[in-house]
Amino acid sequence: MAMEKITYRLARDEWAYTFGGRMPVAHLRSGDVLEVATEDCFGGLVRGPADLPSQVCRMPYLNPVSGPFFIEDAEPGDTLAIHLISIVPARDWGVSSTFPHFGALTSTSHTAALQPPLEERVWVYGIDRQAGTVRFQATESDHTVDLPLDPMIGTIGVAPGGFEARSTIVPDTHGGNLDTPELRAGTTLYLGVNVHGAMLALGDGHARQGEGEACGVGVEIATTTTLAVEVIKGVPAMWPRLETDTSIMSIGCARPLEDAYRIAHHDLVGWVESLAGLETLDAYQLVSQAGRSPIGNVCDPNYTILAAIGKALLPSADPAYAGVHSRLRQSAAGLR
């Protein structure tokens, strides 16, 4: 497959804050490679400890995404494969924060409690791309520690169906704010197409994030992200799926967390059943004993959880989606 590389830089007034309800900023074809600049969830406005998000940011203008990109030949009932080739921090720093009434360990408007809100505070992380580290610096002591740099895309999705426009803060069947560290370079994301042209958009890069994103904020960064797209015709996808060189993963988004868990594992059991030719309860048993359940986030309007299993445990399995992950990965390698 011949790959054409397209570079796109959006102006601030071109950012989108919804999936759906937007005109495309550019057109891509199946097989194209896109290099796109993305901004952090604060729109680059939080740069130091004095830049409290509640003061420098304005709701609902949080979590901007670059796009949407119209994918030619993508129609409802198809699946869009997005292979993340590289995610490079655009600056030598990233930021994180705590918010009043936001995060897993505080009361919220929907989990109300008679207690003071958490203090709003900003942490600035130094990023050393050459060393591959992200430096945590405590704000109330001299403690520092270098963490591995592990860039990821927090928010990526397509337009939902039914004429909906969904806030970029929400994860659901269309993708969106999935906030899983598994969305790193080398991973292929599969999303069901809901509208003509799919309308792909992405942003919200993290230099790294712990599973669960407990405080609700990763190490937020702007990125230069390169990805390849391919339309898989006539194959629907009910929920987002991921594939790496070693694993397949299904993603569930819902509240409560148990329902997100059930969605992800129901989808993975069905995927294992179809790939490996296993009977349903045999697939269920294998996933039960050999599966993993990485948590994406427990802070957003929907929670995100993954169900994952190693490909090596499915030795007779046909390649997922006729080998599109390997094909895109090999083709993308030729670009470097």
Image: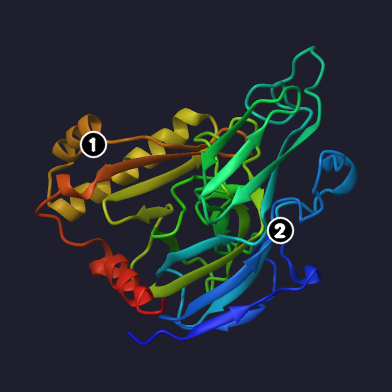
Q: Are marks 1 and 2 in contact (CB under 8 Å)?
A: no
Q: In this view, does 163 lie to the left or right of 268?
A: right
- In depth, the one of 176 and 152 nearer the eye is 152
| Quadrant of image for the C terminus | bottom left
Dot 1 or dot 2: first in sequence order is: 2
Residue 203 percent across, percent down from the top left = 62, 59
Q: In this view, does 42 lie to the left or right of 104?
A: right
Q: Which residue is drawn at 82% across and 16% down?
A: 116
Q: Which colour scheme is used?
A: rainbow
Quadrant assignment, res 100: top right
- In depth, the one of 175 and 183 nearer the eye is 183
Quadrant assignment, res 91: bottom right
> Disc 1 to disc 2, how far (Cα)?
36 Å
Residue 308 percent across, percent down from the top left = 32, 42
Residue 287 numbered mark, or none: 1
Q: Which residue is drawn at 26% across and 47% down?
A: 270
Q: Which residue is drawn at 47% across and 67% down?
A: 193
Q: What residue type is labelled 1?
A: Val
Residue 117 percent across, percent down from the top left = 80, 21
Q: In this view, does 184 lie to the left or right of 301?
A: left
SS at circle 1? helix
Crowd rating for badge 1 (residues with CA inside 10 Å; few <14, some 14–19, many 20+) = many
Q: What residue type is labelled 2?
A: Pro
Crowd rating for badge 2 (residues with CA inside 10 Å; few <14, some 14–19, many 20+) = many
Tell me: residue 102, above or below residue 81: above
Residue 74 numbered mark, or none: none
Tell me: residue 250, above or below residue 330: above
- In depth, the one of 115 and 123 nearer the eye is 123
